């Protein structure tokens, strides 16, 4: 069982920056693929960024060039650095983890609110 706890959300003005963190429990963090998803009010949950166990990354087109995803396996923590934030980035951001096996369960955090507004 893996527990994921997000932090770092808040209110920021357009053009500002925030860094989200996702702290994971357990000893197998380094073997997990990790990702950030977000869900805006009335919208579907969408993939924002993903980082593999090997450190390969991929981003949604809407955040490319503005967001960076990283992980620190020694700290069991994943990060999302968000720069040049826009009002349309407003959403609840969720941390996601999945183990290396095909049948491995999906793990989700409780979410952290990010609001971009002047």
Image: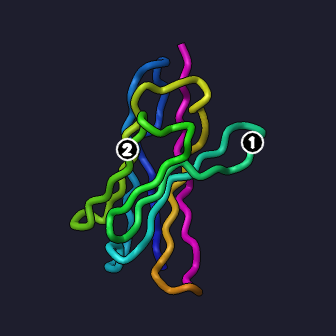
Q: Position of residue 4 (x, y in %)?
A: 46, 63
Label 1 neighbourhood size at 10 Å, few (<14), some (14-19), many (20+)?
Answer: few
74 horizontally vs 89: left or right: left
From the viewer's perspective, is residue 47 above or below residue 116?
A: below
Determine the residue positioned at 42% across, 34% down: 66
Rounded to the nearest angstrom, the CA distance separating label 1 from label 2 is: 23 Å
Tell me the SS state at disc 2: strand
Tell me the SS state at disc 1: loop
Q: Position of residue 104 (x, y in %)?
A: 55, 83
11 horizontally vs 105: left or right: left
30 horizontally vs 4: left or right: left
Q: Which mark is residue 68?
A: 2
Q: Are marks 1 and 2 in contact (CB under 8 Å)?
A: no
Q: Which mark is residue 23?
A: none
Q: Is residue 108 magenta?
A: yes
Q: Is residue 106 magenta?
A: yes
Identify the mark nearer the N-term, 1 or 2: 1
Q: Which mark is residue 43?
A: 1
From the viewer's perspective, is residue 57 above or below residue 103?
A: above
Q: Position of residue 86 (x, y in %)?
A: 53, 24
Label 2 neighbourhood size at 10 Å, few (<14), some (14-19), many (20+)?
Answer: some
Which segment did they paint magenta?
104-118
Q: Position of residue 26 (x, y in %)?
A: 36, 76
- For this orientation, the residue located farthest to the top is 118
Point out the frontmost of discs 1 and 2: 2
Query: Which quadrant of the view contains residue 61?
Result: top right
- For this orientation, the residue located farthest to the left is 74
Determine the residue positioned at 59% across, 32% down: 90
From the viewer's perspective, is residue 81 above or below residue 54?
A: above
- For this orientation, the residue located farthest to the right is 42
């Amino acid at each position: 069982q893996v527990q994921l706890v997000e932090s770092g959300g808040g209110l920021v003005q357009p053009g500002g920056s925030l860094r989200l963190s996702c702290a994971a429990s357990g000893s197998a963090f380094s073997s997990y693929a990790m990702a950030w998803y977000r869900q805006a009010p009335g919208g579907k949950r969408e993939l924002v960024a993903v980082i593999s166990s090997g450190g390969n990354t991929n981003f949604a087109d809407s955040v490319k060039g503005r967001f960076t995803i990283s992980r620190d396996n020694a700290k069991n923590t994943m990060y999302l650095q968000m720069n040049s934030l826009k009002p349309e980035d407003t959403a609840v951001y969720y941390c996601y983890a999945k183990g290396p096996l095909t049948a491995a369960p999906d793990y989700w955090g409780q979410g952290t609110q990010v609001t971009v507004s002047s």
